[in-house]
Image (cartoon, grey):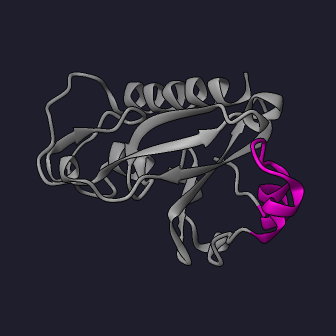
Amino acid sequence: MKPLTEPEIRAAFVNCTKGEASRLNVPRDLAEQPWDDLDFLGWRDPQAPDRAYLATVLDGRPVAVALRSSGAASWQARRSLCSLCVTTHTGGVSLLVAARAGKAGKQGNSVGAYMCADLACSLYVRGKKEVGTKLHESLTLEEKIERTVANLASFLAKVTA
């Protein structure tokens, strides 16, 4: 992934106002991110644990979305599957919900997906970050990356539709 700057990330948000985008917490360590190993940059707001964000480049332009997560629930202790990278976690997957962009979002419509709670999907796929038990897959690394990118693009298409 091409490294993104803070102004690029703030300008890329499609489901919040410019004012909200200017006030949200962007990671301070953007220069230290493993950009070559990322399909998207995902982070949690350290001041608001129920808020998360992700930014990526689609069709040559940055796109970012604000996400909300529900509070911890008893089902989170069970083994769950991330809908983006198809990694299994015990207690490490959260339902993240994005308000839809535009008029639909203003009317309260949203889109949700089960994602790695730490939004480190790219690192799990590449084996740079380990998860307890891995399921065996016959896909190559490139195919797993393509699947993750396609799943992300599908989710973002639902947010922007």
Viewer-closest of 100 and 29:
100
Percent coordinates x, y for residue 95 in the rendering: 40, 43
Q: Is residue 94 above or below residue 135?
A: below
Q: Residue 106 sits in which quadrant? A: top right
Residue at image location 14% in from the left, 31% down from the top: 136
Give the residue drawn at x 54%, y 55%: 42
Q: Position of residue 21 (x, y in %)?
A: 79, 60
Q: Position of residue 5 (x, y in %)?
A: 78, 63
Residue that appears at 49% across and 27% down: 151
The answer to whether residue 146 is above or below residue 21 is above
Q: Which residues are magenta?
A: 5-23
Magenta stretch secondary structure, dominant: helix
In this picture, residue 159 sits left or right of residue 96: right
Q: Is residue 144 magenta?
A: no
Residue nearer the viewer, 142 or 79: 79
Q: Nearer the viewer, residue 8 or 25?
A: 25
Residue 116 in picture, x, y percent from top left: 37, 48
Q: Which residue is situated farthest in the front direction here?
A: 107
Q: How many marks?
A: 0
Q: Is residue 14 magenta?
A: yes
Quadrant (top left, top right, bottom left, bottom right) of the C terminus = top right
